[in-house]
Amino acid sequence: MTETQAAGQFSSNTPEPLPLDIPEPVVASAVTASTPDGTTVHDVVWNDHPGEVRDASKDHPILKHFEYGHLPPHLQAVSRHFQRLAHMMHDTLPMGAELIAGLRKLLEAKDCMVRAANEGQIV
């Protein structure tokens, strides 16, 4: 055992950090919606790849639960950020048990936030 290994520094076994080359958003749209009680909600919608159609055949099935088109506009304003984050993590991190567990927990968090917005607790 070398001195470096004895000190607990196994530099040859240290994994390289993942390159998270996340592109900056290139298109933004302002969105205004009203909640059922009449509160106005302002939001920004980012489109990282305008005009590009996503190949959903390569997506993990859990990503379908992050769709938000069926929601009213004031709930879409909450849900769309979770969908964007879910797709970003899916596209940049290696597929494995931890990624799927993280997406499941993100889905649970999204559901909680959408319910909170629906109850009028946040805008």
Image: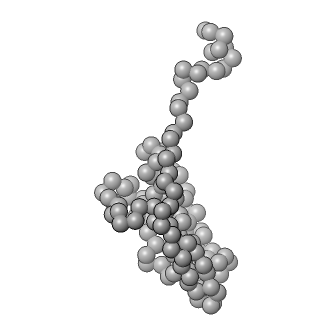
Residue 40 at least partly seen: yes
**Residue 35 sits in quarter:** bottom right
Which residue is found at the position 66% from the left and 10% from the top? 3
Spot occupied by residue 96 in the image (x, y as percentages of width and height): 44, 43
Which residue is found at the position 55% from the left and 57% from the top? 105
In the rendered structure, the answer to whether residue 121 lies left or right of residue 95 reads right
In the rendered structure, the answer to whether residue 116 lies left or right of residue 50 reads right
In the rendered structure, the answer to whether residue 90 lies left or right of residue 74 reads left
Image position of 63 with respect to 33: above or below:
above
- Between residue 93 and residue 47, name the one nearer to us: 47
Spot occupied by residue 60 in the image (x, y as percentages of width and height): 38, 54
Which residue is found at the position 35% from the left and 66% from the top? 51
* Residue farthest to the front, as pictured: 26
Q: Quadrant of the C terminus?
A: bottom right
Residue 96 at least partly seen: no
Which residue is found at the position 54% from the left and 76% from the top? 30
Q: Quadrant of the N terminus?
A: top right
Disc tally is: 0
Image position of 72 with respect to 47: above or below:
below
Spot occupied by residue 104 in the image (x, y as percentages of width and height): 51, 56
Spot occupied by residue 13 in the image (x, y as percentages of width and height): 54, 23
- Between residue 25 and residue 121, name the one nearer to us: 25
Here the colouring is one colour
**Residue 54 sits in quarter:** bottom left
